[in-house]
Amino acid sequence: MTRLASDHAHRVVGLYGDPTVSWSILLEADLGTAAPDPDKLRARLAAAVQQYPHLGAVPEIERTTDLPATRDRFASAPYERTAPLLRVAVRAEEPTLLVAAHHGALDGLGLLSLLGVLLDVPVSSAARGIGDRAGGKPFALSAVQRLAEALFAPPGRISPDRREEAAGDVFAARHEPRLRLGAAGFVAAAARATASWNRAHGARTARVVAALGASWRSGAAPEPVHDSAFFRLRLGPGADVAAVLANQPPEPDFPARSSRLARLGTRLLASRLGSTFLVSNLGVVSTGDTVRSLAFYPAASGRSGVAFGAATTGDVTTVTVRARRKDFDAAAANRLLDEFRDAVHDASAEPRGS
């Protein structure tokens, strides 16, 4: 089943799955209790894998004293065929649990569910999901339109802060007082942060295409599965993001198979496909008193290689940025996150409805 699980996960990423990135998503939980014993974590994980075979092989549980280095490795190392699709590390000092997964095996809520399995506590999110929203255009038509877009009018990008040969991503997180903001509000904040960042770098901001990860299901009782929808929102100046989202169908599912020519085209056009940025919000998460804060790092792909994440637990909202290291160093990622945080506070101060 390991091979089947691995093949399935890579297939879910689909035709537009940027071949230059690992498709590893991460959740970093700052614990309010002592760190769990690795043997117990592995036993719980083994039980979950038995119930959900698509999760693949049971990985070893790592003990870490260097969380940033482990995070970098979990995020950047490719998921080889037949290798585990899950990665787990625990830090005893300043108790922290780091969980990563191939995005084809788990989406954000699925990763949250896996956190609950590992900690042996009920975990839920107030995320409502998008329910039975009707799909849009067929995949073949969408593929032709995306190809034309990539060739003649690719999405705008967040201006790189540098250009160096460097692998992997950089990460930044900020813990803020609890923010009451929905998906549209976070997307609007990311668009404002993009415009502000580009102005500071002497670059225009045109053809903004926001990618938004959302779940078909609510987060009331999440399971460790992948059941997410993907939106591409074209945002003109002053766009009402909530209205655009309400009228935008999700992107079509990828076909079960893709040709070698299609995969080659995707690789050649990887720098022009995708979106300006991606936003993913896990919502208000309930873990009892087990978790003090959650940092969620979605996959960073697309033209800019920048993803904005958000998660709220207790009285803390954690906002994050994940960006390509070849275009942003750690200091630049922190400055970009400052722009996002400021825009999030501005959006949360606006009248409800976003």
Image: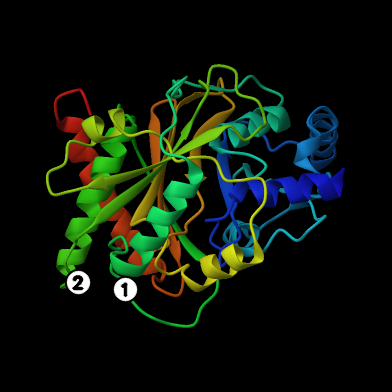
User: Which residue is painted at 62% across and 35% down in the image?
Assistant: 226
Report the disc number at residue 292: none
Image quadrant where one finds the N terminus: top right
Real-space CA distance between mark 1 and mark 2, rounded to the nearest whole angstrom: 8 Å
Residue 161's mark?
A: 1
Say which quadrant the C terminus sits in: top left
Q: Using the rendered view, name the quadrant where residue 323 is placed.
A: bottom left
- Name the residue nearer the viewer: 354 or 67: 354
Q: Earlier in the sequence, mark 1 or mark 2?
A: 1
Residue 176 percent location from the top left of the image? 33, 39
Q: Is residue 329 left or right of residue 64?
A: left
Dot 1 lies on which element? loop
In-front residue for pair 176/260: 260
Residue occupying image coordinates x 78% and y 44%: 5
Q: Position of residue 240 (x, y in %)?
A: 17, 36
Residue that numbered label 2 is attached to: 201
Q: Residue at x 83, y 44 (%)?
A: 58
